[in-house]
Image (cartoon, helix red, strand yellow):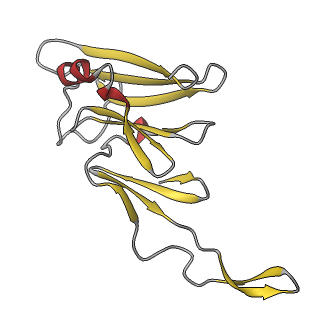
Amino acid sequence: MIGFEGHILVVFEHGIGLAVINERILAGTGEGEPVFINSRNVLPEELTIITDTYGTQWPESVVKTESGSVYGVDTIAKKIWRVKGENVELLSDFKVNKFLIDNITLGERELYPIIGLKNVKTHYNNNKKDVMFTFYDDVYKDEEKVWNLCYNELLE
Protein backbone atom coordinates (compact mmCIF):
# COMPACT_ATOMS: atom_id res chain seq x y z
CA MET A 1 0.00 0.00 0.00
CA ILE A 2 1.24 3.45 -0.88
CA GLY A 3 -0.21 6.93 -0.39
CA PHE A 4 -1.37 8.19 -3.77
CA GLU A 5 -3.05 11.54 -4.52
CA GLY A 6 -4.76 11.61 -1.13
CA HIS A 7 -5.90 7.99 -1.44
CA ILE A 8 -4.27 4.58 -0.99
CA LEU A 9 -2.87 2.63 -3.93
CA VAL A 10 -2.90 -1.12 -3.24
CA VAL A 11 -0.58 -3.29 -5.33
CA PHE A 12 -1.43 -6.99 -5.47
CA GLU A 13 0.44 -9.83 -7.14
CA HIS A 14 -1.87 -9.65 -10.16
CA GLY A 15 -3.61 -6.30 -9.91
CA ILE A 16 -3.66 -2.73 -8.66
CA GLY A 17 -6.52 -1.08 -6.79
CA LEU A 18 -7.32 2.37 -5.46
CA ALA A 19 -8.96 2.94 -2.06
CA VAL A 20 -10.62 6.34 -1.91
CA ILE A 21 -10.31 7.92 1.53
CA ASN A 22 -13.54 9.46 2.85
CA GLU A 23 -12.57 11.38 5.98
CA ARG A 24 -15.48 13.76 5.67
CA ILE A 25 -18.77 13.87 3.83
CA LEU A 26 -20.27 17.08 2.47
CA ALA A 27 -23.47 17.65 4.46
CA GLY A 28 -24.49 20.94 2.87
CA THR A 29 -23.52 24.58 2.84
CA GLY A 30 -23.92 27.18 5.52
CA GLU A 31 -23.41 30.90 4.91
CA GLY A 32 -21.67 30.13 1.62
CA GLU A 33 -19.21 27.70 3.18
CA PRO A 34 -19.33 23.91 2.78
CA VAL A 35 -20.32 21.96 5.89
CA PHE A 36 -18.68 18.57 6.44
CA ILE A 37 -19.38 15.76 8.90
CA ASN A 38 -16.93 13.05 9.89
CA SER A 39 -17.57 9.71 8.26
CA ARG A 40 -17.46 6.33 9.97
CA ASN A 41 -16.53 4.73 6.67
CA VAL A 42 -13.10 6.21 6.13
CA LEU A 43 -12.08 3.34 3.85
CA PRO A 44 -14.43 1.99 1.20
CA GLU A 45 -15.75 -1.56 1.40
CA GLU A 46 -14.52 -2.20 -2.14
CA LEU A 47 -11.47 -0.99 -4.05
CA THR A 48 -11.58 0.59 -7.45
CA ILE A 49 -9.56 -1.83 -9.55
CA ILE A 50 -7.21 -0.03 -11.94
CA THR A 51 -5.88 -3.24 -13.49
CA ASP A 52 -6.46 -6.91 -12.81
CA THR A 53 -3.55 -7.96 -15.00
CA TYR A 54 -0.41 -6.24 -13.69
CA GLY A 55 0.99 -5.94 -10.19
CA THR A 56 4.05 -7.37 -8.47
CA GLN A 57 5.15 -10.12 -6.13
CA TRP A 58 8.12 -8.01 -5.06
CA PRO A 59 7.05 -5.12 -2.77
CA GLU A 60 10.52 -3.56 -3.01
CA SER A 61 10.02 -3.16 -6.75
CA VAL A 62 7.35 -0.48 -6.16
CA VAL A 63 8.40 3.15 -5.68
CA LYS A 64 6.62 6.50 -5.67
CA THR A 65 8.37 9.50 -7.19
CA GLU A 66 8.19 13.21 -6.46
CA SER A 67 5.93 13.69 -9.48
CA GLY A 68 3.33 11.42 -7.82
CA SER A 69 3.78 8.50 -10.22
CA VAL A 70 4.17 4.97 -8.87
CA TYR A 71 6.45 2.51 -10.67
CA GLY A 72 6.78 -1.26 -10.34
CA VAL A 73 8.09 -4.47 -11.92
CA ASP A 74 5.82 -7.43 -12.61
CA THR A 75 8.10 -10.46 -12.90
CA ILE A 76 5.27 -12.79 -13.94
CA ALA A 77 3.98 -10.62 -16.82
CA LYS A 78 7.57 -9.42 -17.44
CA LYS A 79 6.55 -5.78 -17.56
CA ILE A 80 7.58 -2.47 -16.01
CA TRP A 81 4.51 -0.38 -15.24
CA ARG A 82 3.64 3.12 -14.02
CA VAL A 83 0.47 4.40 -12.37
CA LYS A 84 -0.17 8.04 -13.16
CA GLY A 85 -3.59 9.40 -12.32
CA GLU A 86 -5.93 6.41 -12.48
CA ASN A 87 -4.19 4.83 -15.47
CA VAL A 88 -1.61 2.06 -15.71
CA GLU A 89 1.01 2.56 -18.41
CA LEU A 90 3.31 -0.23 -19.53
CA LEU A 91 6.65 1.52 -19.93
CA SER A 92 8.44 -1.63 -21.00
CA ASP A 93 6.27 -2.12 -24.08
CA PHE A 94 7.96 0.76 -25.88
CA LYS A 95 11.64 -0.18 -25.85
CA VAL A 96 12.64 -3.04 -23.56
CA ASN A 97 9.87 -5.63 -23.84
CA LYS A 98 12.02 -8.31 -25.55
CA PHE A 99 14.86 -7.64 -23.11
CA LEU A 100 12.55 -8.25 -20.14
CA ILE A 101 11.08 -11.40 -21.67
CA ASP A 102 14.59 -12.79 -22.18
CA ASN A 103 16.04 -11.63 -18.85
CA ILE A 104 13.39 -11.90 -16.13
CA THR A 105 13.81 -15.42 -14.84
CA LEU A 106 11.91 -15.35 -11.54
CA GLY A 107 8.70 -17.35 -11.55
CA GLU A 108 5.42 -17.17 -9.69
CA ARG A 109 6.64 -19.35 -6.81
CA GLU A 110 9.63 -17.16 -6.05
CA LEU A 111 8.20 -14.67 -3.59
CA TYR A 112 11.05 -13.66 -1.32
CA PRO A 113 14.39 -12.02 -1.93
CA ILE A 114 17.57 -13.84 -1.00
CA ILE A 115 20.29 -11.30 -0.36
CA GLY A 116 23.09 -11.73 -2.87
CA LEU A 117 21.16 -14.32 -4.88
CA LYS A 118 17.82 -12.96 -6.11
CA ASN A 119 15.87 -9.75 -5.75
CA VAL A 120 13.92 -7.10 -7.66
CA LYS A 121 14.27 -3.52 -6.41
CA THR A 122 13.27 -0.10 -7.71
CA HIS A 123 14.99 3.12 -6.58
CA TYR A 124 14.26 6.77 -7.23
CA ASN A 125 16.96 9.45 -7.53
CA ASN A 126 15.19 12.73 -6.80
CA ASN A 127 18.11 14.90 -7.96
CA LYS A 128 18.23 13.43 -11.46
CA LYS A 129 14.56 12.30 -11.61
CA ASP A 130 15.77 8.79 -12.46
CA VAL A 131 13.81 5.64 -11.65
CA MET A 132 16.24 2.71 -11.47
CA PHE A 133 15.09 -0.88 -11.80
CA THR A 134 17.52 -3.49 -10.44
CA PHE A 135 17.15 -7.23 -10.99
CA TYR A 136 19.34 -10.12 -10.01
CA ASP A 137 18.88 -13.87 -10.10
CA ASP A 138 22.05 -15.79 -9.31
CA VAL A 139 20.26 -19.12 -8.94
CA TYR A 140 19.03 -19.37 -12.56
CA LYS A 141 20.59 -22.47 -14.11
CA ASP A 142 24.36 -21.94 -14.35
CA GLU A 143 24.26 -18.32 -15.42
CA GLU A 144 23.89 -15.06 -13.57
CA LYS A 145 21.02 -12.77 -14.59
CA VAL A 146 21.85 -9.30 -13.28
CA TRP A 147 20.80 -6.03 -14.85
CA ASN A 148 19.82 -2.41 -14.16
CA LEU A 149 17.55 -0.21 -16.22
CA CYS A 150 17.12 3.53 -15.75
CA TYR A 151 14.06 5.60 -16.72
CA ASN A 152 14.31 9.39 -16.57
CA GLU A 153 10.98 11.08 -15.79
CA LEU A 154 12.00 14.35 -17.46
CA LEU A 155 13.16 12.77 -20.72
CA GLU A 156 10.61 9.90 -20.61
Q: Position of 16 compared to 34: left or right?
A: left
Image-quadrant location for residue 64: top right
Image-quadrant location for residue 21: bottom right
Name, please, the residue furthest toward the right: 31
Q: Position of 48 compared to 21: left or right?
A: left
- Residue 109's place in the image compared with 119, above or below, is below
Q: Position of residue 92 (x, y in %)?
A: 33, 27
Q: Position of residue 105 (x, y in %)?
A: 19, 26
- Residue 120's place in the image compared with 64, above or below, is above
Name, please, the residue furthest toward the left: 141
- Residue 80's place in the image compared with 144, above or below, is below
Tell me which residue sits at (67%, 21%) in the image. Answer: 127
Tell me which residue sits at (22%, 13%) in the image. Answer: 144
- How many tags in the picture? 0
Q: Position of residue 46 (x, y in %)?
A: 39, 73
| Foreground of the two, 119 or 124 | 124
Tell me which residue sits at (22%, 37%) in the image. Answer: 77
Image-quadrant location for residue 30: bottom right
Q: Position of 35 compared to 6: left or right?
A: right
Q: Position of residue 52 (x, y in %)?
A: 27, 54
| Foreground of the two, 35 or 62 | 35
- Residue 136's place in the image compared with 121, above or below, is above
| Foreground of the two, 99 or 107 | 99
